[in-house]
Amino acid sequence: MVGLKQIEIDQDYTIFETTYLGQLEMTEGGFHSKSIAYNVLSQFYSVQG
């Protein structure tokens, strides 16, 4: 699901926010090509002071 967010708060109140941006599919090789899928994420964190 594009836009799915996961928020995690650490013991020292550091906030980690990860957002799923989608999947990128690529083909590598020539005659015997191989398809590879990459999951694309964005991660933001905030340290409380």
Image: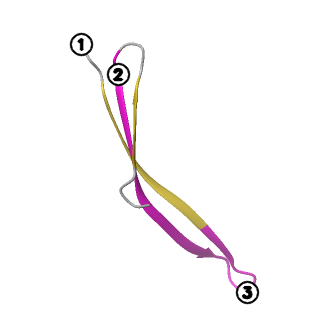
Which of the image's four quarters has the N terminus? bottom left
Q: Which mark is residue 21?
A: none
- Residue receiving disc 1: 49
Q: Which mark is residue 31?
A: 3
Q: Secondary structure at mark 2?
A: loop
- Local crowd at mark 3 within 10 Å, few (<14), some, or many (≥20)? few
- Residue receiving disc 2: 14
Residue, far right: 32
Residue 25, image x, y percentages: 54, 71
Image: magenta residue range: 13-36
- Badge 3 vs badge 1, beta-carbon distance below 8 Å: no
Distance from Cα at disc 3 to Cα at disc 2: 48 Å
Q: Secondary structure at mark 1?
A: loop
Which of the image's four quarters has the C terminus? top left
For this view, does 38 lie left or right of residue 6?
Answer: right
Residue 16, image x, y percentages: 37, 32
Q: Secondary structure at mark 3?
A: loop
For this view, does 15 lie left or right of residue 27?
Answer: left
Q: Is residue 8 above or below residue 47?
A: below
Residue 8, image x, y percentages: 41, 30
- Local crowd at mark 2 within 10 Å, few (<14), some, or many (≥20)? some
Within the image, what quadrant is residue 6 found in?
top left
The amino acid type found where label 1 is placed reads Gly
The amino acid type found where label 3 is placed reads Phe
Residue 6 inside the magenta-drawn segment: no
The secondary structure making up most of the magenta span is strand
Q: Is residue 22 above or below residue 18?
A: below
The amino acid type found where label 2 is placed reads Thr
Q: Residue at x 39, y 61 (%)?
A: 2
Distance from Cα at disc 2 to Cα at disc 1: 9 Å
Residue 9, image x, y percentages: 39, 24
Q: Residue at x 75, y 82 (%)?
A: 32
